[in-house]
């Protein structure tokens, strides 16, 4: 798991349109909000992605860009985005390297069976590339608003 106050891992991943997003390009310009979610089209994941999308303008006013990340491919992301009207960019970490670097790829028990998967997690990276918020195992309900409040708190 990552620690607040440390440099956030940098990476470049393709989005739903297969355009490469390099978060290092935001250094000195914007804060970056990353939310890791298990899979496209799962009910809770859909709620989370649409909730972040619904608040995207408010995040922009706080000088934040928002990205959702999981291991689904770009085509799955495009279909998910288009089906649900998701406006935040969805990034594909198909090999799971970024998930591992952020500590969200974990072993967990589902129905009595241990398996690897993404633990729903959210991070805020400041303009200098430093981690300012690291939340693991988040609850979807009200989460986008919680992260927005945290981003507002960084203004002071």
Image: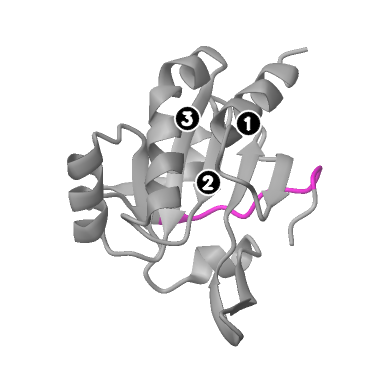
Q: Which image quarter holds the N terminus?
A: bottom right
133 displayed left or right of 148: right
Give the Cα distance between marks 2 and 1.
Answer: 10 Å
Q: Which mark is residue 65?
A: 3
Q: Dominant secondary structure of the magenta stretch?
A: loop
Q: How many marks?
A: 3
Which quadrant of the structure image shows residue 56? top left
Q: Earlier in the sequence, mark 2 or mark 3?
A: 2
Q: Are marks 2 and 1 in contact (CB under 8 Å)?
A: yes
88 displayed left or right of 30: left
**Residue found at the far front of this picture:** 111
Give the Cα distance between marks 2 and 3.
Answer: 11 Å
Residue 123 at what x, y percent from top left? 63, 43
Which quadrant of the structure image shows residue 149? top right
Residue 112 at what x, y percent from top left? 61, 85
At mark 3, the secondary structure is strand
Q: Which mark is residue 85?
A: none
At mark 1, the secondary structure is helix
- Which residue corresponds to mark 2? 35
Graded by Cα atoms within 10 Å as few (under 14), some (14 to 19) or many (20 or more), the crowding at tag 1 reads: many
Residue 155 at what x, y percent from top left? 71, 14
Of the two numbered discs 2 and 3 in the rendering, the one whose residue sits closer to the viewer: 2
Q: Which mark is residue 147?
A: 1
31 displayed left or right of 156: left
x 33%, y 56%: residue? 40
Image height of 44 relative to 39, above or below = above
Residue range corresponding to the magenta coloring: 4-12
Q: Earlier in the sequence, mark 1 or mark 3?
A: 3
Image height of 76 relative to 89, above or below = below
Q: Which image quarter holds the C terminus?
A: top right
Graded by Cα atoms within 10 Å as few (under 14), some (14 to 19) or many (20 or more), the crowding at tag 2 reads: many
């Amino acid at each position: 798991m990552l620690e607040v106050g440390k440099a956030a891992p940098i990476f470049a991943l393709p989005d739903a349109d297969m355009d490469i997003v390099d978060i290092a390009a935001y250094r000195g310009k914007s804060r970056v909000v990353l939310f890791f979610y298990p899979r496209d089209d799962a009910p809770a994941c859909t709620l989370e992605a649409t909730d972040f999308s619904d608040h995207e303008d408010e995040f922009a006013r706080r000088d934040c860009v928002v990205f959702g990340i999981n291991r689904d491919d770009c085509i799955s992301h495009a279909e998910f985005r288009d089906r649900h009207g998701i406006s935040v960019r969805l990034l594909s970490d198909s090999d799971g390297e970024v998930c591992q670097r952020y500590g969200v790829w974990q072993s967990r028990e589902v129905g009595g069976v241990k398996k690897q998967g993404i633990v729903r997690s959210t991070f805020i990276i400041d303009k200098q590339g430093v981690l300012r918020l690291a939340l693991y195992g988040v609850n979807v309900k009200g989460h986008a608003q919680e992260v927005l409040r945290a981003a507002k708190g960084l203004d002071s």
